[in-house]
Image (cartoon, coloured by chain):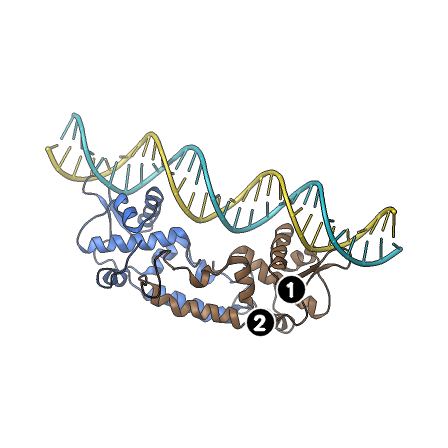
Chain colours: A blue, B brown, C cyan, D yellow
Amino acid sequence: MILSKSCEYAIRATVYIAVKSGKNEKVGIIEVAEAIGSPMHFTGKILQTLVRKKILSSAKGPTGGFYLENGHLLFLIDIVRAIDGNGLFSACVLGLERCSETQPCPMHEQVKPIREMLLNEFSKKPVTELVSGFGANGYFLK
Amino acid sequence: MILSKSCEYAIRATVYIAVKSGKNEKVGIIEVAEAIGSPMHFTGKILQTLVRKKILSSAKGPTGGFYLENGHLLFLIDIVRAIDGNGLFSACVLGLERCSETQPCPMHEQVKPIREMLLNEFSKKPVTELVSGFGANGYFLK
DNA sequence: ATAATAAAAGATACGTTTGTCTTTTATTAT
DNA sequence: ATAATAAAAGACAAACGTATCTTTTATTAT
């Protein structure tokens, strides 16, 4: 698995919340979990983390819920880094501590371009783009 | 992390065993664990699995140990599949059950070429190639 | 002020991966 | 045959990721 389960939920939840935010609506945990097919309480924890890391915003109380700050340009890489950290893009594929550009492991050069593509793809992909696909192309999140 | 810890150990151990097999030597668990810097007993388990999956061979008793069948052309993908399965190359990056070629998730097209490169890189890379690098280029496994 | 709502926070539990230790089985050399 | 060696196998434990449930805190509407 490329991303952790938590990170998968985080992306799906964020996309769903972004869709709603586009209509100026806030969303509660229950609705998010229902929409993306994730365990409710666990999803709450993840969203909590995303709020702490400034990926999402939230409001307590009635009419409250999770939402995306208007005009906050958000990329997938931000979510991945917030939940899984940067290991996917930096840690040696063979788990070697000393592996580096100058002291490469036997797989270093082979993995490098792949890693760069991954990083690039996540970096240049705004959440909004996934959102527009969601409405138009019949994408689903569950 | 792209590969599990177990899989990292598996690859490093196999490369080390391949180096030794090139000199017609068998290697014991203790030496392997020492050479690649992995927990000994855990490494034993992993090697056991690799033997069961016909990646490696082993012999019990004195002069015994792990070795690579002579002329057995082995690719990294074989080790990855034996330990981590095929999920890295097939499972939806967003964890969506229904995601497929005809019903793609919002990230499907972006991830596809990356996945193919990964698969290709692991598939075309014979363990022997890592081995030659090991002796010549000062590669290390620990 | 009060009640209702909804996120935040904390405690607990489950499952998998990772890691350790001990016993058993097979093989070799003496 | 016996002792030594080394993998195989099994039992167990720690750590982490995943998941559930309960209590607390903040906010809103009445």
Image x and y of residue B61, in percent: 76, 55
Q: Which residue is mark 1?
A: B16
Q: CA distance from mark 1 to mark 2?
A: 14 Å
Asked if residue B7 can be seen in this view, the reply is yes
Residue in the picture at 49% in, 68% down? A111
In the rendered image, which quarter contains the C terminus of chain B? bottom right
Asked if badge 1 and badge 2 are on a common chain, one would say yes
Q: Is residue D9 left or right of residue A88?
A: right
In the rendering, which numbered label is found on residue B126?
2
Q: State whether residue D23 is above or below residue D10.
A: above
Rendering quarter of residue B74: bottom right
Given the image, on which type of amino acid does mark 2 rest? Pro
Q: Nearer the viewer, residue A38 or D28?
A: A38
What amino acid is labelled 1 in the image? Tyr
Measured as percent of width and height from the top left, residue A27 is found at 23, 47
User: Depth check: B24 or A85 in front?
Assistant: B24
Viewer-closest of A29 and A39: A39
Give how far across and how far down residue D18 sits, in percent.
41, 47
Name the disc covering residue B4, or none: none
Neighbourhood count class around disc 1 (C-alpha, 10 Å): few under 14, some 14–19, many 20 upward: many
Q: Is residue A42 above or below residue A106?
A: above
Q: State which quadrant residue B76 falls in.
A: bottom right
